């Protein structure tokens, strides 16, 4: 999700934004806002049920989505995403983040380029803002709305991940990213 979110960001998530189910029932309450294109959300991914991921919703149920080159198309229209996405060549994959230790990981796309996919009922299509280095719905498929845990809306706290020695306590203050604290997630 870089640069929307950075390593070291602590975020606030509104857990009831999309409503919630009463345990043991199919009754959903407080579902005033449906998942919408552009929302940054936290969810349980279909392939790793013990984790929580954060991505951006790029398509909702009934939408037709596909990529062509570096561009995303929803319902046949090219999505203007310049405010939040970035593209990097695949030879620049991150060595310090386990899923991206090999470029082969990035090439295992379940949804090949230029092949339209219709998002099924009760699901959303999620993509990371760092499009070329993102494990997302292109790889593991759409996300069930019931697996959504909430909408991310603000950076509560942010610190840079700079190494420091034990006696360099003064660096704690210099690691704080004051310009990110309180920033709305768009």
Image (tube, rainbow, N blue to C red):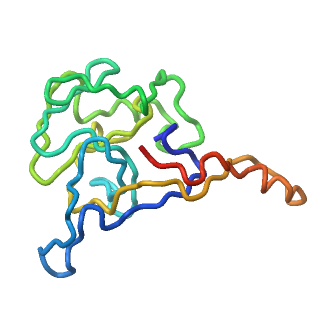
Total numbered badges shown on the rendered structure:
0
Which quadrant of the structure image shows residue 186?
top left
Q: Is residue 185 left or right of residue 94?
A: left
The answer to whether residue 129 is left or right of residue 45 is right
Taking the view exactly as shown, the residue that stands out farthest to the right is 167
- Closer to the camera, 43 or 178? 178
Residue 126 in percent (x, y) is at 29, 43
Task: Determine whether 20 is above or below 117 in the image.
Answer: below
Q: In this view, does 72 lie above or below 42?
A: above
Which residue is found at the position 57% from the left and 52% from the top?
9
Residue 92, position in %: x, y? Answer: 54, 25
Q: Is residue 184 above or below residue 114?
A: below
Picture coordinates of residue 172, whole percent (x, y): 78, 56
Q: In which quarter of the image is residue 104?
A: top left
Q: In this view, does 66 lie above or below 168?
A: above
Give whichever of 128, 51 is nearer the camera: 128
Q: Which residue lies most toward the top here?
A: 69
Residue at 82% from the left image edge and 52% from the top image edge: 171
Quick check: 84 left or right of 48?
right
- The residue closer to the viewer here, 89 or 79, is 79
Q: In this view, does 148 lie to the left or right of 171?
A: left
**Spot occupied by residue 178 in the image (x, y as percentages of width and height):** 67, 50
Q: Residue at x 32, y 61 (%)?
A: 49
Residue in the image at 34% along x and 43% along y? 56
């Amino acid at each position: 999700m870089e640069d929307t979110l950075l390593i070291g960001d602590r975020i606030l998530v509104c857990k009831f934004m999309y409503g919630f189910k009463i345990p043991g029932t199919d009754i959903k309450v407080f579902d005033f806002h449906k998942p919408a294109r552009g929302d940054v959300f936290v969810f349980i991914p279909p392939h790793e049920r013990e984790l929580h991921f954060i991505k951006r919703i790029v398509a909702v149920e009934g939408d037709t989505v596909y990529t062509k080159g570096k561009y995303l198309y929803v319902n046949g229209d090219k999505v203007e995403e310049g405010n939040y996405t970035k593209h990097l060549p695949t030879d620049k994959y991150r060595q310090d983040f386990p899923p991206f230790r090999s470029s082969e990981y990035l090439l295992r796309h379940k949804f090949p380029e230029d092949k339209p996919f219709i998002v099924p009922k009760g699901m959303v299509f999620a993509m990371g803002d760092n499009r070329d280095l993102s494990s997302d719905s292109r790889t593991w498929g759409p996300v069930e709305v019931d697996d959504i845990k909430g909408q991310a809306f603000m950076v509560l706290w942010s610190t840079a991940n700079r190494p420091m020695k034990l006696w360099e306590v003064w660096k704690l203050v210099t690691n704080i990213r004051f310009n990110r604290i309180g920033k709305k997630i768009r």
